[in-house]
Image: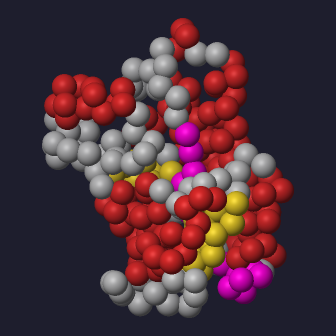
Amino acid sequence: MKYSERFAGKVAVVTGGCSGIGRAIAKRFVADSGKVVVGDIDTDSFAALTEELGAENCYCVKCDVSVRAEVDAMIQAAYDKFGGFDCMFGIAGINIMKDFLDFTEEENDRIFNVNYKGMFNTTQAAGRAFVAHNTPGAIVNAASINVRCACPNSTSYAASKGAIAALTRGAAVELAKYGIRANCIAPGSTETNMITDQARERFPNYTAPKLLVKRMARPEEQANLACFLASDEASYISGECYFNVGGWGVS
C-alpha cells in the first residue's frame, strides 16, 4: 500500500527493524516510496520481511548494534545495495524489568551496551557516512517516556534512554554544520514484543489512569512520528525529543 511519494528516491537504515516500532517504520518508509536496509539480530525474520516489503525495496543485514564492526557493515550494505542512504532510524533496544536493588552489574551493562552504546555506534556511523558523502541526512533515535517519568523496575532502562536523548541533542548540535538533523521519539507503552508480561499486567491499574488515551499505542502510531521527523516536512526540526505517550502527565 502506497501512502505518498515523500520518500521517493530516499533510503533509510533501520535498526531493530524486524519487529515492533522498527518494523512499522520500515513498512511506513517503503509505503511512502522509499527503500530500507534493516539491521537486526533476528535473522529468522529476514525472509518474511523481505517478501512483505519486496526485495527491490528491502535488504536485511545481521547487526548487533553494540558491535561497531557490524554497524559499519550495515552502513556499507546501504551503499552496496542502494548506493547510499538518507535517514538513520536507531530503534534497536532491550529492557530488563527488575527491582533496582536486585539488578546485577551484568544486567545493567547489557542494557547500556545495547541501548546507549548501540545508539552511539549507529548515530556516529551515520554521521560519519553523511559527512563523507556530503549527504544532508536525518537521524531519528528511540528514547522513551522513561526519560521524564520514572516507572518501577525500569531504572537502568530509563537511565539508558535518558542518555540516548542527551546523545541525540549533542549530535544535533555537532552535526548541524553539515546539514544533518537529529531528533528523538519518546514512545510510551506500545504494543510490541518488548512489552513484558509485568508491564502488560500493570497497564490497566498503573499506567492507563495516567493517560488521556486509555490504551497502548500501536507501533504504526510511533512510526508515523518517526517518519515525519525523518522527512523534509520536518526540515526545521532538530535536537528535539518528541513524546508520543497518549497524554501521560497532562492531567
Determine the image quadrant of residue 223: bottom left
Determine the image quadrant of residue 111: top right
Where does residue 49 sit, x and y in percent of width and height?
Answer: 51, 70
Q: Left or right: where does residue 82 sit relative to residue 97?
A: right
Tell me the magenta residue range: 79-94
Q: Left or right: where does residue 206 sit relative to residue 112?
A: left
Where does residue 113 sit, x and y in percent of width and height?
Answer: 70, 38
In the rendered image, the residue lying farthest to the top is: 101
Which corner quadrant holds the C terminus?
top left
- Residue 167, compared with residue 56, is above or below; it is above
Residue drawn where x is 55% and y is 40% of the image: 94
- Residue 44 visible in the shown view: yes
Where does residue 217 sit, x and y in percent of width and height?
Answer: 28, 51
- Residue 213, compared with residue 148, is above or below; it is below
Residue drawn where x is 25% and y is 32% of the image: 203
Residue drawn where x is 81% and y is 76% of the image: 132
Magenta span includes 16? no
Q: Left or right: where does residue 215 sit relative to residue 145?
A: left
- Residue 5, compared with residue 205, is above or below; it is below
Between 217 and 228, the residue placed more toward the observer is 217
Between 57 and 178, the residue placed more toward the observer is 57
Between 235 and 106, the residue placed more toward the observer is 106
The color scheme shown is secondary structure
Residue drawn where x is 28% and y is 28% of the image: 201
